[in-house]
Amino acid sequence: IDWAHYKKLVPVAGLVENFQKQYEALKVPYPQDKVSSQVDAQIKESQSEIDSYKKASEQRIQSYQKEIAHLKSLLPYDQ
């Protein structure tokens, strides 16, 4: 928050300083982080599954490319 900007705009003396003190004194309690470790474990587990899927996909792509190359090497039907 740009308090200096508000101090210039608000004509009431002390109002912005009062709000600033109240704002800075306000403490919002945040809950403890209990699930980040579980999420990290799921990410690592998913990453291994993703890597294995990518590897299998690359193998399928290579197989299909060989099949396409074979089909292109054949004579056309009209010959």
Image: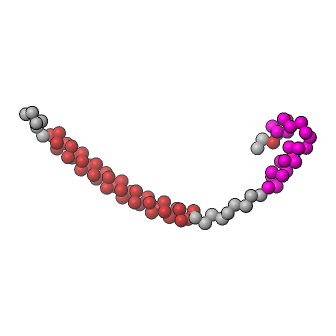
Marks counted in the figure total 0
Which quadrant would the C terminus be assigned to in this image?
top left
Instruction: Reply yes or no: does residue 23 show up in magenta.
Output: yes
Secondary structure mostly seen in the magenta stretch = helix
- Residue drawn at x 40%, y 56% is 50
Residue at position x 24%, y 45% in the image: 65
Taking the magenta stretch, the answer to whether it contains residue 5 is: yes
Please tell me which residue lies in front, 35 or 69.
35
At x 50% / y 64%, what residue is drawn? 41
Please give the range of residues in magenta: 4-26
Residue farthest right in this picture? 13
* 52 displayed left or right of 62: right
Please state the horizontal and vertical placement of residue 7, each as a whole percent of the image. 85, 39
Looking at the picture, does residue 52 appear above or below residue 79? below
| Residue 9 or residue 2, whichever sits in front | 9
- Drawn side of residue 8 relative to residue 39, left or right: right
Instruction: Single out the residue that lies furthest toward the top.
Output: 78
Q: Position of residue 39 (x, y in %)?
A: 53, 62
Relative vertical location of residue 37 with respect to residue 55 in this rendering, above or below: below
Image check: 8 left or right of 77?
Answer: right
